[in-house]
Amino acid sequence: MALPKSKSKSGILYACRECGDTTAKWSGKCLSCGTWDSLVEVAATSLEDDSQKRGLGDVGEAVRLKQVETRKEPRTRTGLTEFDRVLGGGIVTGSLVLIGGDPGIGKSTLLLQMATILSAADVSVLYVTGEESLTQLKMRAERLETPSPDMLVLSETNLDAIFKQCQQSKPKVLVIDSIQTIYKPDLPGSPGSMTQLRECTLALMVHAKSTGTAIFIVGHVTKEGVLAGPRMLEHMVDTVVYFEGERHNAYRVLRAVKNRFGATNEIGVFEMAALGLIQVENPSQVFVHSRGERDPGSVVSCSIEGTRPILVEVQALVSRSNYSTPQRVSMGLDSKRLTILLALLEKFAGIEIGLQDVFISLAGGFRVEEPAVDLAIACAVASNHLGRKCLPDTLALGELGLNGELRTIPQADARVKEAVRLGFKTVVLPQPMQGKINVPGVKLHFVKKLGDAFEFIYQT
């Protein structure tokens, strides 16, 4: 946190929850990051004391990069393949991982399952809960049928007491559930306040790097879907993982938005069941419910998530609007991208839906951001609007340009192979990719324009 150039006469400063900048005068908007209603009152003396406590101490000597010794340390497997995939292959020694998600999405369940599996594999684990009693934690473990009698558990919110326990037990993995309940007694503010969140996370980071303990912390999210507290928490940790999905939907998607030790485009898929989270090793069969003939408005495409191709079913509904401004609703897709695709349908395909309500959804609650599913979205909207079914066992792949042309997509071979593995017989692809794909057992049809794709897909 940057200290102000001049002290407040009253000894009170106002700090931004988002960027951490301070000012001597309150205002409705932070002048540094532009966030409204983010300034909170803090004591100026406490900020100065905190800054001095975090001094560098002994100054280290700079060395050349080639003089730094490196060693490859094996990662610790969590026992959950989908979780390992998101982490980049397993737990890195001394890493600090922040897991966020909506209430009840499965954050604590995932970490409890991981902790019990590691403990059963003779990995020392300390599970600290600040929201439950030890009796409640054991009841949850028994309900999940994953009890581990040797796992250390602690119900504590005082960070100094937690570190004292760590000095005694020396765990290899430490779980903090959740960071909003932890506090340092020598700092002002209640647990969950900006100062406490920042300083507790910083202390955990120092502990992880100095002792080699891998630390997992649970973070609450706001109603806007972002982690509660200052955004600097995401910069301080090594890995930020979000749990996505609807509470009333059985499937959960674990996605890394930051990872210093691996790729950020990998995802893990889980199913929430009575016994906890069950790994979904073949997500394509989950998000595509059936093969063969499809109803109007349903088209299958393929998305690449990290190194794994996943088939997704795009569903569209076009209906007469009862409002002066037609609705454009998308679930699992970018709403701005949908607006562009609808304009392309009217401009280059003659599909007049300007006065119609359009609803787009991905089956299973999945979310896709890449443009390779553009063709499938356009075909699904046109299919439902015209009441015409698409060819059975057909996959649509391609990015749409603003001139109505189909553009190439990356990793097309992997997408086509995944379609063949699940029994699809025909794949529609952009014309520029002709001759670049060699996958046996499937018919490849190349199209240049959006209208050409419609002529082939809707033929009977």
Image: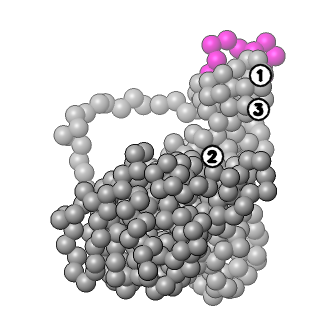
Q: Residues within 10 Å of mark 3 (few under 14, many from 20)?
A: few
Point 39% across, 64% down: residue:
453
Q: Residues within 10 Å of mark 2 (few under 14, many from 20)?
A: many
> What residue is disc 1 on?
27
Does residue 435 show up? Answer: yes
Q: Disc 3 on helix, strand or loop? A: loop
Residue 173 appears left or right of 43:
left
Kindly identify which residue carries mark 3: 37
- Amino acid under label 2? Cys
Percent across and percent down for residue 324 are: 77, 47
Circle 2 SS class: helix
Q: Residue 96: where, in percent of width, then height?
A: 50, 54
In the image, what residue occupies the spot 68% across and 36% down?
17
Q: Is residue 255 rendered to the left or right of residue 309? A: right
Which of 438/124 is in front? 438
Q: Whole-Å distance between the Cαs marked 3 and 2?
A: 24 Å
For the residues bearing labels 3 and 2, Cβ distance under 8 angstroms: no
Q: In percent of the image, x 64 and y 36: which residue is there?
A: 18
The boundaries of the magenta stretch are: 3-12
Q: Is residue 219 visible?
A: no
- What separation in Å lies between label 1 and label 3 (alpha carbons)? 8 Å
The reply to whether the magenta stretch includes residue 10 is yes
User: Which residue reaches farthest right?
Assistant: 10
